Image (cartoon, rainbow, N blue to C red):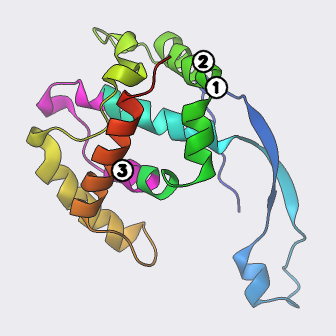
Amino acid sequence: KVVIEVSGRSMSEPAQDVKLHSYIDDVYKNAPFTEPDFEVRAVVPERTFLEKLFLLHEEYHKSAENVRIARMSRHLYDICQIMDTPIAERALGNKDLYLSVMEHRRVFIGLRGFDYSTLLPQTLNIVPPADILEKWRQDYREMQNSMIYGDSPSYERLIEKLRMLNDKINKLRY
C-alpha cells in the first residue's frame, strides 16, 4: 500500500520517477501476493528538505500557545538525518530552488502576519525556541517509540546538529 499526500497547496515540481520496492516482498519472495517493483512520480527530496526547514521557521514565529506540538519533532529528526547527505548540499546550494519553495509558501501557505522574507538564509531559524523546547522533547520521546525505527540520536544531539546546520544556512548569501 502506498499513501500519497495530495494538497491543492502542494508544489509538484521539481519531481522525479522513483522505483518502489516492498519489504514484505523480500521476506515472502515466493508468496502469491508479492508484486513487482513499480515507479511513482515524486517530488525531489531537496525540495522536501527545504520545506521542512521553512515549516519549522514558520512554526516558531507563532505565539507559544499556537505552536503545534504533536508529531512535529519528527521534522527535527528528518532534517538531522538528511543534513549530512548530498541532498542537503544540493538543496542549500540551489538558490533558484530555495527561492522558488520560499515563494510557493508565501503564495499558498500565506500565514497571516508572517514576513516570508525571514525565510531567506540569513534570518532562517530552525532551532526550537526555549518556550517549546521541553514540549518538543516529550514529543520526540513519543516519536522514538512509535514512528522512528532503529537507533535515533538523543534530543540533545538533534538540537546540537540543528544549531550547526542553522549556522551554516545563516552564512549563505542569496
Which of the two discs, 3 and 2, labels the residue nearer the N terminus? 3
Q: CA distance from mark 3 to mark 2?
A: 22 Å
Which is more toward the observer, 4 or 97? 97
Q: Amino acid at mark 3?
A: Leu
**Residue 68: image x %, image y %?**
26, 39
Q: Secondary structure at mark 2?
A: helix
Q: Amino acid at mark 1?
A: Met
Is residue 34 shown above or below 36?
below
Q: Amino acid at mark 2?
A: Ser
Extent of the magenta region: 59-78
Task: Give the residue at x 15% y 48%.
Answer: 133
Question: Which residue is identified by label 1?
Answer: 11
Assess whether mark 1 and mark 3 are in contact (beta carbons under 8 angstroms): no
**Residue 85: image x %, image y %?**
57, 54
Which of the two discs, 3 and 1, labels the residue nearer the N terminus? 1
Which is more toward the observer, 38 or 99? 99
Q: CA distance from mark 3 to mark 1?
A: 21 Å
Q: Does residue 82 appear left or right of residue 119 in this picture? A: right
Which of the two discs, 2 and 1, labels the residue nearer the N terminus? 1
Q: Secondary structure at mark 3?
A: helix
Q: Does residue 91 appear left or right of residue 29 in this picture? A: left
Question: Which residue is identified by label 2?
Answer: 100
**Residue 54: image x %, image y %?**
42, 30
Q: Is residue 89 visible?
A: yes
Q: Is residue 5 visible?
A: no
Question: Which residue is identified by label 3?
Answer: 76
Task: Give the residue at x 87% y 66%.
Answer: 37
Magenta stretch containing residue 64, yes or no?
yes
Foreground mark, 3 or 1, reads: 3
Magenta stretch containing residue 154, yes or no?
no
**Residue 97: image x %, image y %?**
63, 24
